[in-house]
Amino acid sequence: MDIIPFVHEGLGNSSYLVGLGNGDAVLMDPDRTAARYFRAAEERGWRIVAAFETHIHADFVTGATEVIDAASAPVYISHEAPMAYPHKGLKHGDRTRLDGAEVEVIASPGHTPEHVSYVLRTGEGPPALFSGGALTAGAAARTDLVAPELTEPLTRAQFRTIRGAFNALPDETLLLPTHGGGSFCTAGSAGERTSTLGRERASNPLLLYEDEDEFTRWFPTTFPAVPAYFSRMRDVNQSGPRLRRDIPMPRPLAPDEFREAAKDALVLDVRQVEEYARGHIPSSLSDAFRSSYATWLGWLVPLGTPLLFVLGRAPLDTVIDESLLIGHERFAGFLEGGVEAWEVAGLPLKTLSIIDSRAAREMLSDGATPIDVREPDEFGGGHVPGALHVPLGRLQQELDRLPRDRPLVAYCGHGERSTTASSILERNGFADVRNLEGGMDAWRATGQRVAV
């Protein structure tokens, strides 16, 4: 078999296009950016004949409906998954025969109740295990995304899955998970994105636990924060997302039109930090277009919010694809001519003050408050002395913790998240906000004192 991974670095996920050796191909856990799968298949002379879903995804919109539409191919998923779109339900032990291959279903609940894994065999080489989040390279996926009352039973199910579900497979079995390093779905010490069962049996720290009760107490303590949009993705995926072709693309708007549209929409500035700082539309939200763009858009902006884009050099089609990937579909327009056209039209701009570590130290000595918007594990690994810790994903909900009678110095790891934080603070009336250039990395590099 010929396996082509498609990795989304920001979401930390992989999907797979698998050539079966006879011109047919299958997809494993495809996401909504489905055109790339069909391009890759066409380049190789392959025909996509089926798609398999390991579980109902919480972190991205499925590409299943796109596959059904473009390839007229069946989508397979657990029979326990109540999907509203056409699909074929599979049970543990079922074997789907394809021309030149066989796919066996292994029930592997834990990450979700309906989770299954797929063993693909072609008769040549080792079998391939597409494990979703049941077992990942050096880790496994979290068990708290469905409902609070299900976290304990799902954690127990995950324990039994990782210790027993795949025991009949040989060590040389290729392990090809959906979740990996960088995914908010993954817990534990994720390293490589792929592995073998033999390597995981020898080194995965989760397999060190032999007592189910001990594992059940410990495993949930390793989970990272949950992006806000996760709670809505299962419903989107169960109902069957709209096709991309049916979602209107944003149209170009002249500055006056854009200003008028902004009365009923959110202005989303996807330019890089330095461009945003030099001049931006008042009350716009900064989310620099990078690998984690979609995660923060989903976390900070409620689904259904009309979006107006300030693009800069970011390609419109790619920005839209990334926005669609986490469920945003209401695109009100984009600023034709960018901020330069806005300025030529005589419309107001604001700036963000970016300061280096030495200037920040002086401001803090004079009474400014440092705001650390990183995640708890980052904060625990060292922070600016006296910093108020408010992770970016919770900032909008915890603004009342922040002083308004003194300057604020926002920082993160490098500078992108703190720029987003600064834009949120500006939108909410904080008058004197500075952004620490280079974030905590620069603070350390210049020899400033670090608290732990």
Image: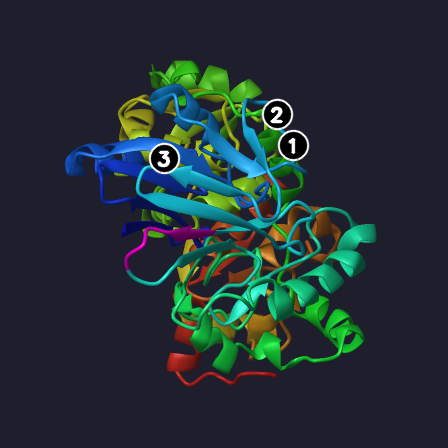
- Which residue is pictured at 32% across the width and 21% down the height? 345
- Which residue is pictured at 38% across the width and 80% down the height? 445
Neighbourhood count class around disc 3 (C-alpha, 10 Å): few under 14, some 14–19, many 20 upward: some
Region of the chain picked out in magenta, as a range: 119-124
Neighbourhood count class around disc 2 (C-alpha, 10 Å): few under 14, some 14–19, many 20 upward: few
Q: Is residue 263 above or below residue 1?
A: above
Q: Secondary structure at mark 1?
A: helix
Residue nearest the viewer, comparing 109 with 383: 109
Q: Position of residue 418 (x, y in %)?
A: 50, 57
Query: Which image quadrant is residue 371 in?
Result: bottom right
- Which residue is pictured at 67% across the width and 62% down the height? 158
Q: CA distance from mark 2 to mark 3?
A: 24 Å
Q: Is residue 409 above or below residue 116?
A: below
- Please name the residue that numbered disc 3 is placed on: 319
The type of residue carrying mark 2 is Ser
Q: How is the image coloured?
A: rainbow
Residue nearest the viewer, comparing 10 with 413: 10
- Which residue is pictured at 75% across the width and 51% down the height? 400
Disc ID at residue 235: 1
- Please name the residue that numbered disc 2 is placed on: 239
Residue nearest the viewer, comparing 170 with 199: 170
Q: Are marks 2 and 1 in contact (CB under 8 Å)?
A: yes
Q: CA distance from mark 1 to mark 3?
A: 23 Å
Residue nearest the viewer, comparing 135 with 221: 135
The type of residue carrying mark 3 is Val
Q: Secondary structure at mark 3?
A: helix
